Each structure stands twice: as structure tokens, then as C-alpha cells.
Image (cartoon, grey):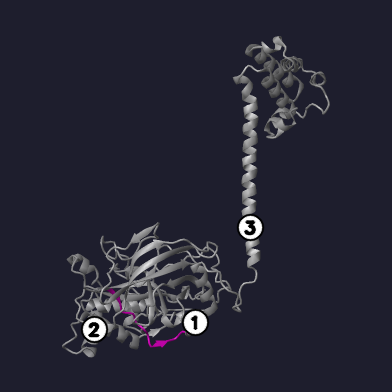
């Protein structure tokens, strides 16, 4: 049972809002919601040409095996159902107890690009490893990861003659996969189905027993999103021994209980189910929210969990719409990181615009970096010109430092103006004395040349005090923040 509705996604396949799509809830509902069932939630890229034996691609996300007295829930026992990942990979995440490739299974790779948030990853059939992947389009996809899967390739006949269960299970582990309601009608019906459909010499084969149950439910049950079993103490029993009208959760529970009644370890798995025809010849598979599905699985020794889905032959709901081929192709190209062609298939004619935009973006980045470096360099020069007089007893350096301070205040020597005239115009006694020493050094005055660090320091301190008394503090602070002020010092 794969309920799908008629809601059409937007032309870009964008999922609106903070939508979350998971298959962690197996509550029975009398009217399963059909809203936005065609909203795309993921696109899967197949890296290998794989055709499933059943004609349906199953993407497992969750598993439910523990009977809580009313329905199946996630197991609380350590070591069971570890083939279902609890979270997304940061780098690479190996799945414990995953089946290995062999005569019945092949190793396949795929890429999953999520269009909606999920709490855990899903992968084709039986994932072996999840690997984080680079998101080629963060504006479109929420997360991208690669999956290595071990998928069944053999037909139904290759699974016959296998023992049920895992030899590594303890008696309590096996008991969990066989637990079911105490209602004796389950065992009676399961035995009746096996006796009617299986020949005596093969009715002990686990795979044949599971297949007989699934086939019987497909013939006897009716699929519908509307049912009347949620209020019952045992919704599955109310469905199975009542009108047999329900959706995938009802069919999966009923099949699991009946298989367990025959001694076959079984569980309910959840995820997405997509018919092979939906590929439409391509390697991309568009998954919509309406493809969410629950199905029964049985464990065969040496093979692992095998899907034994129920396909109801009667349905009260309209057939699902096929995926939009153009949307599937577009999202597949985006997931590969390929720039899609226009709808008419013509080569994109605006590549030069993209190149110009990219060049403008690069140029802007380089210019921005150059501006930042220029500011840093000017501040460093300004700092050096401020510190230099404190490191050397030089009248020239002390005089230059005072010129810098005056330039910060917007006061600088005019062109053609002598240094003495400039000092007289400024009218700061300490600065006038520094000017005399500087001019004296330039003309070889011994008095000026012999001026020591204490005298120069005293003059610098005096000039600082005189500026503070003459100019407001905020003017001095703003001037100090201007990195290029020293260019005006002459």
C-alpha cells in the first residue's frame, strides 16, 4: 500500500516550510492524511543499473519488531535491528549486521539528496554504509549522502530452503521476533492459509510460508486510507478478522503477526517504495511524501532481512499519479551538480552572463581584501611613526610625530609656508621649540644635535598637554582613528 494524493509540487520541486518526513510512527489511524502526498522529499541517483526482482525499489529507513501489547514499536533490546541507522553520517558510517554481497545479493551505490528534513537516513533495500557527501546545491537540498547497499538480485526460487532467523540470536532475541497478540485466531488463520496454499512437502519452508501469507492478504484485503480500526484494543485484529479494509500499516502488521504465528521471525519496516517504472528510463528516482510505506520482512539465515510486501488487489483509492518526468530529470541534474538545460533542450545562451557575474564576484572579493590590507598597513605605519621617537633620541622623529598629531586635528603646513611660520601659526610653545631643534639639526647646530632624550621627551609631553588644553577630546579621538592622516603631515 503506497498512498499518494494529487497535490502538485511547484515547478522547481521546492519543499515549502520546515517540513519533516519520517517513517517513525506506526500509529493506526481511521483516516490517514493524504495532504501534500505528491510533495517531493528526495531524489535518489542510482550509480548501478539495478532492476529489483519485485519490480519495486524499497528504501528502508526504520524497523519495528517489539510488540508492546497493541502494536509493533522500535526494539529496546541491544543488538537487534542494528541494520537501521540511528543518525546521519558525519563522514562514513558502517551499518552493523548488514548482509554481505553473495549469490543472492549485489553491492550497489546510490546518492540521496534530501529536499525535506529527515531524522535519520534511508537507503536502497539493505544499506551497508552511509557516507556524507558534498551538497552541490545547498539552496535546493537539505542534505546529500551516498549509500552502499546490499540488494537482493536473485529471484524467489533462490530463497527457498533457507532456515529462518539468525544463528547469532539468543533465545530471547528470537522470542522478540515471534511475539504477537494472544488472540488464538492469528495462529488458526495462519495455519489455515499454510494448509490451503502449500503442499505438505514444502509447507515447512519459511520463505514459502511468508509468501503464502502475503499472497493471501493481497487477495483478501482491500486498500483504503479510510478505515475504522484505530479505536480497537487490537487494531490489527479488528482489521484482519473484520472488513479487511486498511492501508499499509494494517497489512504490514497483519502479515507480520501471521508469519510469526507460523514460527517465522518477522518485523515491520518503513521507508519509501517506488515502482521501477517511475525511473522512466533514467537513473534518477524522485521520491514524494506519498511514497511513504510500511512492509513486512522475514529473516533468512545467510540472506538477512527479506521484503515480503503485500500488494492488495482491490483498492478504494484512485491510482497514484506518476512522477513528473521533467521535475525528476531536473532534480537529478541538480543532485549531480550539473547545470540543467532549458526545457526546449537548447544550449544555455547566458553563460557569458554567469562568467561576468563570477568575474565581478571575484574582483569584488580581491578589491575588498586589498582595501582591508591597505587599512592595516596604514595603521601599522601610523603606529610606527608614533612609537619611533620613544625608541630613539632624534629631534627629527619627535618633530615628525608632532606633525602627525596636528594632521589628525586637520592642521598641516601649507605649500610654500616655512616651518617657523607654521609653528608660529599653530601657537603651541612646545611645538615651536621642537621646530627650532628640527631646523637646527638640518643646519648642523651643535646645540640641536646634542639634544637628548629627556629634553625631547619633555617637549613631547608639553606638546601633548598643550593640545589637550586647546582642542576638544572628541576631535583628538576622531583624528586618531583616521588611518591616512599622516599623509597630510608636512
Residue 334 bears which disc, if any?
none
Identify residue for label 1.
322
Q: Are marks 3 and 2 in contact (CB under 8 Å)?
A: no
Quadrant showing the C terminus: top right
Q: CA distance from mark 1 to mark 2?
A: 32 Å
The secondary element bearing badge 1 is classed as loop
Q: Is residue 304 left or right of residue 425?
A: left
Q: Main secondary structure of the magenta part?
A: loop
Residue 291 pos. (x, y %): 44, 76
Residue in the foreground of this view, choosing between 92 and 488: 488
Query: Sequence order check: which comes first, mark 3 or mark 1?
Result: 1
Write the residue at 55% across / 77% down.
8
Q: Residues in magenta? A: 305-317
Residue at the spot x=62%, y=41% of the render?
A: 373
Rate crowding at label 2 as few (under 14), some (14 to 19) or many (20 or more) other CA atoms within 10 Å: many
The residue carrying mark 2 is 208
**In the image, residue 203 above or below residue 23:** below
Q: Is tag 3's residue or tag 2's residue first in the polypeptide sequence?
A: 2
Q: Nearer the observer, disc 3 or disc 1?
A: 3
Quadrant (top left, top right, bottom left, bottom right) of the N terminus: bottom left
Cα separation, mark 3 vs mark 2, equals 65 Å
Q: Residue at x 39, y 59 (%)?
A: 89
Q: Where residue 55 sits in the image (x, y, percent)?
A: 37, 82
Can the viewer see residue 473? no
- Please give the residue where the numbered disc 3 appears in the rendered image: 359
Q: Any magenta on residue 449?
A: no
Of all residues, the one furthest to the left in this rendering is 201
Local packing at callout 1 (Cα closer than 10 Å; few below 14, some 14-19, many 20+) is few
Residue 94, image quadrant: bottom left
Q: Is there CB contact under 8 Å for labels 1 and 2?
A: no
Name the one closer to the observer, 176 or 95.
95
Q: Is residue 310 magenta?
A: yes
Amino acid at each position: 500500500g503506497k498512498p499518494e494524493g494529487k497535490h502538485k509540487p511547484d515547478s522547481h520541486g521546492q519543499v515549502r516550510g520546515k517540513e519533516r518526513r519520517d517513517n517513525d510512527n506506526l500509529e493506526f489511524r481511521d483516516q490517514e492524511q493524504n495532504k501534500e502526498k505528491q510533495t517531493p522529499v528526495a531524489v535518489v541517483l542510482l550509480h548501478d543499473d539495478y532492476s529489483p526482482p519485485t519490480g519495486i525499489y524499497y528504501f528502508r529507513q526504520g524497523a519495528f519488531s517489539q510488540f508492546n501489547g497493541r502494536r509493533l514499536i522500535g526494539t529496546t533490546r541491544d543488538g537487534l535491528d542494528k541494520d537501521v541507522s540511528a543518525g546521519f553520517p558525519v563522514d562514513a558510517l558502517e551499518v552493523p549486521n548488514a548482509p554481505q554481497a553473495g549469490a543472492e545479493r549485489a553491492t550497489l551505490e546510490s546518492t540521496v539528496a534530501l529536499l525535506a528534513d529527515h531524522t535519520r537516513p534511508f537507503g536502497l533495500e539493505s544499506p551497508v554504509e552511509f557516507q556524507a557527501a558534498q551538497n552541490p546545491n545547498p539552496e535546493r537540498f537539505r542534505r546529500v549522502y551516498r549509500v552502499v547497499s546490499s540488494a537482493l538480485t536473485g529471484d524467489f526460487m533462490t530463497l527457498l530452503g533457507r532456515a529462518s532467523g539468525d544463528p547469532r540470536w539468543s533465545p530471547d532475541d528470537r522470542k522478540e521476533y515471534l511475539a504477537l497478540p494472544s488472540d488464538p485466531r492469528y495462529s488458526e488463520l495462519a495455519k489455515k492459509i499454510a494448509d490451503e496454499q502449500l503442499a505438505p512437502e514444502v509447507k515447512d519452508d519459511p520463505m514459502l510460508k511468508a509468501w503464502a501469507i502475503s499472497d493471501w492478504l493481497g487477495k483478501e484485503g482491500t486498500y483504503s486510507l479510510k478505515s475504522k480500526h484505530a479505536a480497537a484494543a487490537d487494531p490489527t485484529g479488528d482489521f484482519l478478522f473484520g472488513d479487511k479494509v486498511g492501508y499499509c500499516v494494517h497489512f504490514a502488521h497483519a502479515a507480520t503477526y501471521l508469519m510469526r504465528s507460523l514460527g517465522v521471525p518477522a518485523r515491520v519496516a518503513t521507508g519509501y517504495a517506488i515502482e521501477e517504472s517511475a525511473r522512466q528510463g533514467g537513473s534518477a528516482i524522485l521520491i514524494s511524501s506519498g511514497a511513504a510505506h510500511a512492509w513486512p520482512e522475514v529473516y533468512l539465515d545467510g540472506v538477512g532481512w527479506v521484503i515480503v510486501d503485500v500488494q492488495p488487489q482491490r483498492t478504494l483509492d484512485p491510482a497514484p499519479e506518476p512522477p513528473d518526468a521533467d521535475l525528476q530529470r531536473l532534480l537529478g541534474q541538480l543532485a549531480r551538480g550539473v547545470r540543467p538545460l532549458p526545457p526546449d533542450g537548447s544550449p544555455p545562451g547566458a553563460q557569458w552572463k554567469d562568467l561576468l557575474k563570477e568575474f565581478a564576484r571575484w574582483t569584488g572579493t580581491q578589491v575588498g581584501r586589498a582595501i582591508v590590507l591597505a587599512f592595516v598597513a596604514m595603521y601599522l605605519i601610523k603606529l610606527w611613526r608614533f612609537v619611533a621617537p620613544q625608541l630613539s633620541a632624534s629631534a627629527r622623529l619627535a618633530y615628525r610625530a608632532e606633525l602627525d598629531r596636528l594632521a589628525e586635528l586637520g592642521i598641516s603646513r601649507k605649500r610654500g609656508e616655512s616651518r617657523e611660520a607654521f609653528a608660529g601659526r599653530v601657537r603651541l610653545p612646545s611645538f615651536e621649540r621642537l621646530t627650532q631643534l628640527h631646523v637646527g639639526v638640518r643646519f648642523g647646530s651643535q646645540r640641536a644635535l646634542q639634544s637628548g632624550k629627556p629634553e625631547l621627551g619633555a617637549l613631547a609631553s608639553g606638546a601633548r598637554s598643550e593640545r589637550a588644553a586647546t582642542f576638544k577630546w572628541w576631535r583628538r579621538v576622531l583624528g586618531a582613528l583616521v588611518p591616512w592622516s599622516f599623509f597630510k603631515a608636512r
